[in-house]
Image (tube, rainbow, N blue to C red):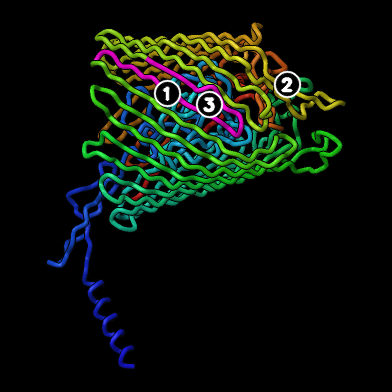
Amino acid sequence: MRTILLLLMVSLICSQSVYSFTITADSSKTSADSLLSIDNQPKKDTTVKLPLFEPLRNHGALFLLPDTSVDRVEKQDFQFLNYTGMLDVIDAKIPLFQLTQGYYGMMSNVSVYGGSANDNTLMFNGHSVNDVPTGLMYLEQFPVEFTDGAEVATGMNAVILAGSASGVATNLREVRFNTKTPFTRIWYTQGGYGFGGSNGILSQNISSNMNATVGYRRLGADGRYSNQWLDAWNVYGLLRWNLNEKTNVSYTHIFTNYATGLNGGVDPRTTTDIGDEVTANVRYTDLSERIYKHQGTLLLTQALAADSTSIFSASVYGENTIHKKERDTLLYLNNTDTLRTATITNYRFGGSIRYDQVLLGGLTLRAGGNAEFRSINTSQYNESFDGLALTGHILLNYELDSHLKSRVGLRYNSIGQTVAIPSIGGALEFTSSIFTLIVDASQSDRLPTVTEGLGLLPEHHTLAFAKLQVHLPEQTTTSLTAFVRYVDNPIIPIPEYVDTTLLVKNTTFSNQTNKQVFGGILEANTLWNSFVIKGNLLSSIQYINNQKEQLYPALLANVQARYEYKTGTSLLYAGISLQARTGFQGEWFIPVNWSYAKADVTNSAAYNGIDLLTGAKLGNAFIKVTFQNILGTRYTTLSTFPQNDRNLRLSVAWSFFD
């Protein structure tokens, strides 16, 4: 009994000591990106001050040390885009040809430098989040608001740092808040044919250097055409700890529930006018898909040198995805395929490391590697796989002087027993007072996916481009790019048709001999008084097995002009956007196994009917309105998937306690 009383007295004394020990934040150090600083009131002489460490800007970055050779989109830029998904963010940064199904939230992709949909990589915090069975990036499944910004890389940068990405590699950094009081932002959007969406995010520091962020994103739609409905949502969260001024540790988790009708576009054989949604017949009236996905990432970033010339990053991540495809009985593949639901389950668990170091004499080293275990079950549309995917890369940047810079890199890729030829790349950049010339070349392999068949040969890509940027008077930029792409063993989908109809029930894949693309890009941007004018012209010619196959337009023009009025911190703008293209054979999206095949009809020359743009920044509120296709033209980027006709889209973003 005496012992118990003694322990109680000691506990009471200790508890009083703990409660009298106070930690407060040093208000002299606040984050440059803080929405509100942390500044607790000082206590008595017993107070111990704990510094408020600024979150590292390169936490989750692809380039740990700054580099001017990559395009960046910051989270502030998102607010001036009337976006519904990541496609709008990427499209605003680099010239590309969209591969879209014409309606909000539907699966979309892009073609860059004449590449295909399989040549692109979407990354989060430095590792790929492309779909494992198909190898495609699913832009609609990622919540835009959960990012601090994006790095958009092309050419040898994408090939070396992101692997099978001779098109474009987009790395999204986790969102970065540092707030004492609760910060809340809401986003709401609405469009025609029953489309609506919202996002809410809440963030607050739960201690001086630990931040918690949670949020959701919701999209839903009835669709313009039959079987074009959408039902999608994300729930996401983050816990970040700034251990000191050089070290950040975070855990992020994203849950995705994405469901959509897959109508395969308008059926041109039974439809007179593909632009009339009332009388149009779609290819698939009873085909839909739901995807469940959990993604978790534990990330460490540490600056190893006081002057931030040496930075290390490491992550451990995991993902579980379930694809459930509901099909009409006509789409059963054979006598053993008797289930209405085709299910694909895959897991991947991996770890990655990155290290950037400034060496002597203007030399910067970037090195890293990734090991990932993948497990995919067999389904009607893919092979099974259980094994390791390994990568490693090294990239050297050398700045000879203020006029001449160079880059050279090497990457290794393997999946199971399939080993790719090491990817190599190099670039030179020469700058004078009149112009900047960039020459970029790379060779890389794209390994086949389990949907295509692991027995196929890897595609071997050679991509080269030269970009000339002319230095014009202040506030004006212009550039001209010429590129060539050569692909050995291109993997080409071949549609398989239902016996009694022309309905495609599956596609098989085979290696062809070669694919060649030649093209150019002209870009121009200017600010004249309060007028902003942006435009680009893309040109490309494609050949497969030395036969001309115009999968993408020979000419595609984009022009946007707007007037801006600023008063204080507020901004008003209004303008127009026009896109026009020449006729082309095109591709169409086959939804039964997520493939892009040569279209079965020819697409005539068309334009998007002109979009009217207007918006405002009023305090903490951003309001954006787009009146799409005011002339109601028939416009497609993927064959038989018409873009929306006259359609009003509204978006509002508003932050509280900012």
Q: Which residue is mark 2?
A: 494
**1 or 2: tag closer to the N-terminus:** 1
Three-letter amino acid code of the residue under disc 1 = Asn
Three-letter amino acid code of the residue under disc 3 = Ser
Which secondary structure dominates the residues rendered in magenta? strand
Relative vertical location of residue 340 with respect to residue 531 in this rendering, above or below: below
Q: Which residue is mark 1?
A: 157
Q: Which type of secondary structure does the marked residue at label 2 adopt?
A: strand
Q: Which type of secondary structure does the marked residue at label 1 adopt?
A: helix
Three-letter amino acid code of the residue under disc 2 = Ile
Whole-Å distance between the Cαs marked 2 and 3? Answer: 22 Å
Badge 1 density bin: few <14, some 14–19, many ≥20, Cα 10 Å: many
**Residue occupying the point 50% across, 44% down:** 198
Residue 400 spot, x, y in % from top left: 26, 16
Q: Are marks 1 and 2 in contact (CB under 8 Å)?
A: no
First to last magenta residue range? 402-427
Residue at far front of view? 417
Q: Which residue is mark 3?
A: 164
Q: Is 340 left, or right, of 168 in this rendering?
A: right
**3 or 1: tag closer to the N-terminus:** 1
**2 or 3: tag closer to the N-terminus:** 3
